[in-house]
Structures are given as structure tokens and as C-alpha cells.
Amino acid sequence: MDEMQDIRFKRLGKAIREKREEQGLAQQQLAKMIGHSNSHTYITRVEKGQIKIGLEQLMKIADALGVRVDDLIDF
């Protein structure tokens, strides 16, 4: 994956973290809401841009946070 894509996934992860924190949700709570009930490390890795999530997973996260997908994408 090229450097620009890495930067974009990090920015996406930051936006997810900010929305999650605004709502007072722990990483484990968000993980459970999207079907990763046994691991908050998944959310940690998403928020750090270490996991390159696809559209389906992004939609699940946006739905869980009660936001639109484009509220999480700033690029």
C-alpha cells in the first residue's frame, strides 16, 4: 500500500476515534456494537490505521456511532 493510502487510513482512524470519544464509548463497547465483541484491539488497530477496513466494516462503524460514512472521511 502506498504512503498516501496509509495516511488516509490513519486520518480515517483518527476520525473514528474522535467520534467514539465524543460519545463516551470505550473501544470495547464499539467493538461489541459492530460484532467484534471479544476484542477491543480491533478498534485500536482501526483507529491507528493499521487495519485497512473495507466499505462494509466502515458502514458498520458509522452506523454504530450514529454518523454518516462521509462524516468519518475527510479526504
Image (spheres, helix red, strand yellow):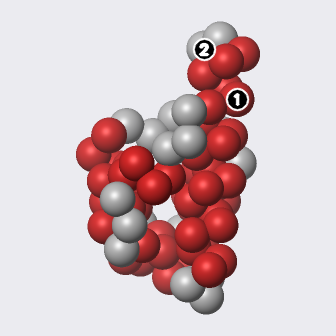
Is residue 64 at least partly visible in the picture? no
Quarter holding the C terminus?
top right
Query: Looking at the image, can residue 11 be seen?
Result: yes
16 and 48: which one is in front?
16
Label 2 element class: loop
Amino acid identity at mark 2: Met
Which x, y percent locates residue 39?
54, 69
Badge 2, how many Cα within 10 Å: few under 14, some, many 20+?
Answer: few
> For numbered disc 1, what is the local secondary structure?
helix
Q: Which residue is mark 1?
A: 7
Residue 42 rendering spot, x and y as whole percentages: 56, 57
Which residue lies most toward the bottom here? Answer: 24
Q: Residue furthest top?
A: 2
Say whether disc 2 or disc 1 marks the residue closer to the N-terminus: 2
Amino acid type, residue under disc 1 in the picture: Ile
The residue that appears at 50% across and 52% down in the rendered structure is 72
The number of numbered badges drawn on the structure is 2
User: In percent of the image, x 67 and y 18: which residue is there?
Assistant: 4
**Quarter in which the N terminus is drawn:** top right
Residue 21 pos. (x, y %): 65, 77
Q: Which one is in front, 60 or 39? A: 60
Can you say whether 28 is above or below 15 in the image?
below
Q: Residue at x 57, y 59 (%)?
A: 16
Q: Report the residue marked by disc 2.
A: 1
Residue 29 image offset from top left, x and y in percent:
50, 82
Q: Which mark is residue 73?
A: none
Q: Does residue 3 sit above or below 38 in this rendering?
A: above
